Image (cartoon, rainbow, N blue to C red):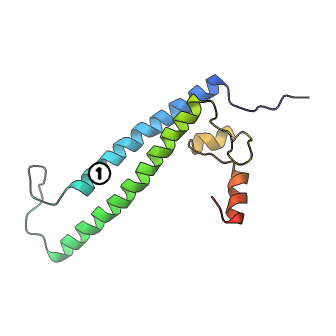
Amino acid sequence: MAEIKTRYSDAELAEFKAIIEEKLAKAKAEYNTLRHIVMHNGTNDIEDTTPSFRTVEDDGAFQLSKEEASQMAQRQYKFIQNLEAALVRIENKSYGICRVTGKLIPKERLRLVPHATLTVEAKEMLAKQGKN
């Protein structure tokens, strides 16, 4: 009888760690860009090359884009936190184990969603129950 695998090997964990670290670097760069957009106060300083005669409509569009950037920054921050938590799970060798079923999350899923903590089946089961 074949042995059922209960966790990923150190080599497999190293592969996932590299994927996560690459995504984390990109996510942090994007987050910093979004934060800059949100924090930019709209004054005409050295960085601002736009004319100082904006209309009311321009101000509304500018505010909307800042609000959108703020929401995107919040989502990106949560993504960063999830990736960092995945790195902790790699370090304690619990990475890739479904928190509901205890089964290994398939490699294909982890490559696409490296911070996943649920198998697709567990996620669907929780969705049917109205939990997550």
Quick check: 110 left or right of 128?
A: left
Q: Residue at x 59, y 30 (%)?
A: 92
* Quarter placement of the N terminus: top right
Q: Nearer the viewer, residue 51 or 73?
A: 73
Q: Give the image location of residue 123, x and y in percent.
A: 68, 55
Most distant residue in the right direction: 1
Mark 1 Cα shell of 10 Å, populated few (<14), some (14-19), many (≥20): some
* Quarter placement of the C terminus: bottom right
Quick check: 28 left or right of 46?
A: right
Is 45 above or below relative to 93? below
Is 89 above or below relative to 50? above
Q: Nearer the viewer, residue 11 or 103?
A: 103
Q: Residue at x 60, y 45 (%)?
A: 116
Is 91 above or below relative to 114? above
Q: Residue at x 66, y 38 (%)?
A: 107
Give the residue at mark 1.
Answer: 35
Most distant residue in the bottom direction: 56
Q: Residue at x 33, y 59 (%)?
A: 70
Q: Give the image location of residue 57, x and y in percent.
A: 20, 76
Q: Give the image location of residue 36, x and y in percent.
A: 25, 50
Quick check: 20 left or right of 77?
A: right
Is 68 above or below relative to 87? below
Most distant residue in the top direction: 11
Q: Amino acid at mark 1?
A: Arg
Location of residue 25 (image quadrant): top left
